Image (tube, grey):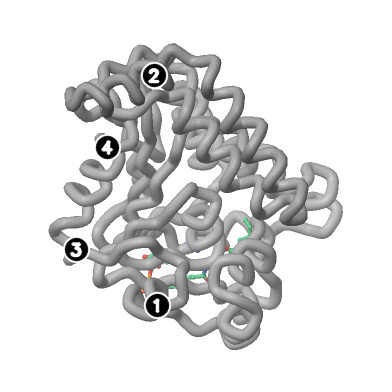
Amino acid sequence: MSYENIQVRTEGGKVGIVTLHRPKALNALNDALMDELGQALMAFDADEAIGCIIITGSEKAFAAGADISAMAKYSFQDVYKKNFISRNWETIRQVRKPVIAAVSGFALGGGCELAMMCDFIIAADNAKFGQPEIKIGVIPGAGGTQRLPLAVGKSKAMDMTLTGRMMDAQEAERAGLVSRVVPVDKLADEALGAALVIAGYSQISVMAAKESVNRAFESGLSDGLLFERRLFHSLFATADQKEGMDAFLNKRAPDFKNA
Ligand code: HXC
């Protein structure tokens, strides 16, 4: 499959990497790019060999937001009728394998929202996160007002959303928006290392873990705990559970078959 707005490759036969690639517009996320991203993510998700996916951008920008030059012309009727942004921005929610955002440079507006749709964010020390939509007369439209408070709490989320200011990588790590910060020249290796670790585990338990953590954001504690317990129980039906525990007890490396 050839793409115009993204680049796609695999590493170690197990990790799928999508690089956002509209360098002249700081990877502004237009419709064509989001269509391609959705196709690439679904293809990696369907590929049995792939155990983890990374989305990344350039050193200067993960993505500077939805494409303002495209949006500037839209009317209410346009965006309401085509349900902008739901159609292609929500594809990522269907991906069952883990998706890591490796963020360098600007992750603003829809770019910050895309990073937050990923399962976790590894940031380069030059990363800058923000929801500056207020400065152009709108508000976040791809989950920013919902996921940012879940990640950093109400006060900081309000501050970011109402002032439009940017947060640097250190503040983002302190606030819990990102899981790790590394020097910019180490970002690709750090993300790939994490992805290879994940891809080395049983895909079944990895998908169950992702599903269960996500449940924490969509249910009350009692429902979430029950959901986790039932998934935990169901993993005892897998060969990978037998293999993983036997390997531990016999002091050897596990050989997971994703079964
Ligand atoms: C379209 C964009 C863009 C964007 C940058 N560019 N961001 N084009 N949409 N979101 C383009 C610029 O127009 C410029 O094109 C080129 O990329 C380089 O950008 P500069 O501004 O010259 O770079 P710099 O001075 O380094 O400033 C970087 C920046 C600034 C701080 C990131 O570009 C900026 O503020 N961008 C907009 C950020 C933003 O408001 N994002 C939220 C968008 S709304 P030319 O042709 O002039 O070289 C949004 C809503 C999401 O995301 C809702 C759900 C989808």
How far apart in space, not on screen, are marks 1 and 3 (Cα)? 18 Å
- Disc 2 under 8 Å from ligand 1? The reply is no
Which residue occupies 51% across, 38% down?
209
Q: Is residue 9 visible?
A: yes
Q: Quadrant of the C terminus?
A: top left
Asked whether mark 3 and ligand 1 are closer than 8 Å, the reply comes as no
In this rendering, the label closer to the viewer, 1 or 2: 1
Residue 67 shows in the view: no
Per the image, the residue denoted by label 2 is 1
Q: Earlier in the sequence, mark 4 or mark 2?
A: 2
Query: Reading the chain from its start, which is encountered first: label 3 or label 4?
Result: 3
**Which residue sits at x=35%, y=12%?**
257
Hey, which quadrant is residue 47 in on the image?
top left
Quadrant containing ligand 1 reads: bottom left
User: What numbered label is drawn on residue 184?
Assistant: 3
Q: Between 204 and 154, which is closer to the camera in this rendering?
A: 204
Element type at mark 2 = loop
In percent of width and height, residue 148 lies at 59, 68
Q: Which residue is mark 1?
A: 174
Between label 1 and label 3, give the one nearer the viewer.
Answer: 1
Q: Which residue is mark 4?
A: 197
Q: Nearer the viewer, mark 3 or mark 4?
A: 4
- Mark 2 belongs to which amino acid? Met
- Tell us which disc is closer to us: 3 or 2: 3
Vertically, is 224 above or below 11?
A: below
Q: Position of residue 250 (x, y in %)?
A: 21, 22
Report helix, strand or loop for mark 3. helix
Inspect the image, locate mark 3, and give the three-letter code of the amino acid beneath it.
Val
Residue 193 shown left or right of residue 127 in the figure? left
Vertical relation: 175 (above or below) 213: below
